Amino acid sequence: MHVKVIAGNSSPILSKRIAKELNIPLAKVTYGKFPDGELYVRVEDRVDKAIVVQSIRCSDDIVYLMLLFDVIKEAIAVIPYMGYARQDRAFNEGEAVSIRALAEFLESRAEKVISVNLHSREAASHFKNLIEVDAMPLIGEFYKKEKSKGTESLIMVSPDIGSLERVKVAAKIAGCEYDYLEKVRIDAENVEIKPKNVEVEGKKVVIVDDIISTGGTIAKAAETLKAKVEAACVHAVLASNALNKLFSAGVKKVISTDTIEQPVSKISVAKLLANAISNIYSTL
Ligand code: R5P
């Protein structure tokens, strides 16, 4: 039986880390694009059972998965970042529930789907066979180490009430205080954050969120807090020049996990995902 890890085009580094953790070889795969934009996949090794690791950042990532599943008949799908999860309901009549469509596709092809911090309970509810792992403890561990190096006390701030539960998990492990702000989303790129008195004097402030997409949320939160802040997230989508926006708003440092491979990915979810995979295939 040839069990291999297939590194999706979007997750080459994380796939290698997971393969190392599991001590399973990586399959040789070629990804290509024809001049007209059509995508191409070739799996060059024999693979009877695959662990396909592919974050979904954009539509091409879904097409690559679709082509991989045409070759690989038996697979578990590891989707470290599940894009399309923010459209978890029809906000207006006639809208597609994007994550529902994606869940149906993934579950029709993979025997199990594993992902990291889906955006909402609503998004997760569209899956029947999902294993969701939580990377917030890893952010907590990261700041526990940082805290031990410095003298400043630390406070983690959630930019909205929706992320508060996640932030509590990280803060508990880091052994620090936490608070939250109140956010109102105006549109995809703009948010408003209500003024609120958060005690930040003399503290290192870390704004923690599940996703940094355009950076609008964190930039506004940093302006509201009027303090030297850092930002930490699980999924660093970093669309529309987000890092630039964050640094211009005075954010000193940005860190994330490697669910999306970015220059700021300082924390790896490889062990977390390898454990979830091992629990499924305990005989690997
Ligand atoms: C929204 O509810 C999420 O938790 C994030 O706050 C949001 O996706 C961040 O988006 P952006 O960086 O574009 O403000």
Image (cartoon, rainbow, N blue to C red):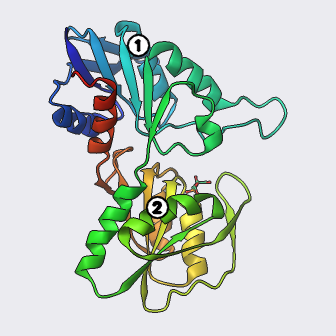
Q: Residue at position x 35%, y 87% from top?
A: 152
Asked whether residue 254 is in view, the answer is yes
- Residue at the spot of label 2: 169
Disc number for residue 233: none
Q: Residue at position x 34%, y 10% from top?
A: 72
Q: Is residue 149 left or right of residue 132?
A: left
Q: Is residue 278 left or right of residue 243?
A: left
Closer to the N terminus: mark 2 or mark 1?
A: 1
Q: Is residue 70 above or below residue 94?
A: above
Q: Position of residue 131 (x, y in %)?
A: 45, 33
Indicate yes or no: mark 1 CB to ligand 1 under 8 Å: no
Disc 2: CA contacts within 10 A as few (<14), some (14-19) or many (>=20)? some
Say which of 68 and 171 sits in front. Answer: 171
Q: Position of residue 155 (x, y in %)?
A: 46, 78
Q: Is residue 11 left or right of residue 102?
A: left
Q: Is residue 127 above or below residue 264?
A: above
Q: Is residue 82 above or below residue 209?
A: above
Q: Are marks 2 and 1 in contact (CB under 8 Å)?
A: no
- Residue at the spot of label 1: 69
Given the image, on which type of amino acid does mark 2 rest? Val
Nearer to us: label 2 or label 1: 2
Asked whether residue 38 is in view, the answer is no
Give the position of the N terminus as an image quadrant. Answer: top left
Query: Ligand 1 lies in which image quarter?
Result: bottom right
Indicate yes or no: mark 2 CB to ligand 1 under 8 Å: no
* Quarter location, residue 34: top left
* Quarter location, residue 186: bottom right
Given the image, on which type of amino acid does mark 1 rest? Phe
